[in-house]
Image (cartoon, helix red, strand yellow):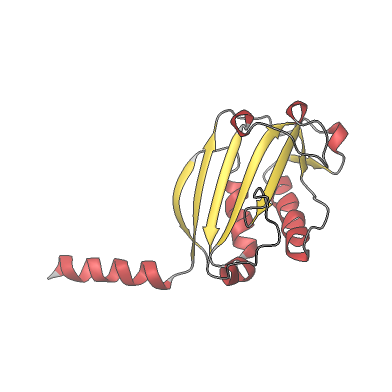
Amino acid sequence: MKIKFTVILILFLNGCISSVFISSISNQTIEKNSPIYISKFDGISMEEIIFREKLTTALKRKGYYTINNFQKSEYYLITFFNNRLQNNLDQKKNVDIFSMELLLMESKHITNSSNLQFDKDDALWVCNIKLNWLEFLNYQDNIVATIAENFCNSYYGRRILF
């Protein structure tokens, strides 16, 4: 009886508690004082601007050095919202699933900040995030803190957002 109750409780909590699925793979660690540029694309949405600023602040709190000049950066953190890598940018957002991908590259592998030409295999850290769009908006601070906590570390699983 206790096992049945425990299984039901776990399934109930898993479905009712807001959580984010994070999959990150790190190939190498970086020094915390190395200059990192966080991507800023043309046509960036207000949500992306806010997320970028929050991520910058969270990484600075963790001891990483972020700058706003691509030419002076050692590392380039590329953020793709809702599969921006796909050619069809006119796709309507699927409100049920929100996906984000973060790639940390050495700046020398990127020709310039506006025309991204790179090989994903050169990424030092890759992080994929999947959650509901409304949860992203409601728990953005917690998501940013979770990303900063797992920055340049490997992690696979679901994290509870409170």
Horizontal side, residue 94 vs residue 108: left or right: left
Classify residue 69 as left or right of residue 86: right
Instruction: Give the residue drawn at x 17%, y 69%.
Output: 4
Question: Can you give x and y, in whole percent of width and height, for residue 145 in the image?
Answer: 62, 55
Where residue 90 appears, as percent x and y from the top left, is 70, 62
- Residue 67 lies, in percent from the top left, at 83, 41
Does residue 48 appear to the left or right of 100 in the view shown?
right
Residue name at image x 69 percent, y 51 percent = 58
Residue beneath the point at 80% across and 39% down = 115
Task: State whether residue 138 is above or below residue 111.
Answer: below
Where is residue 111, by image quadrant? top right
Residue drawn at x 77%, y 30% as measured from the top left:
74
Q: Nearer the viewer, residue 6 or 86?
A: 86
* Residue situated in front as seen by the camera: 74 or 62: 74
Position of the N terminus by quadrant: bottom left
Task: Give the quadrant of residue 118.
Answer: top right
Q: Tell me where residue 33 appears, x and y as whole percent.
A: 75, 33
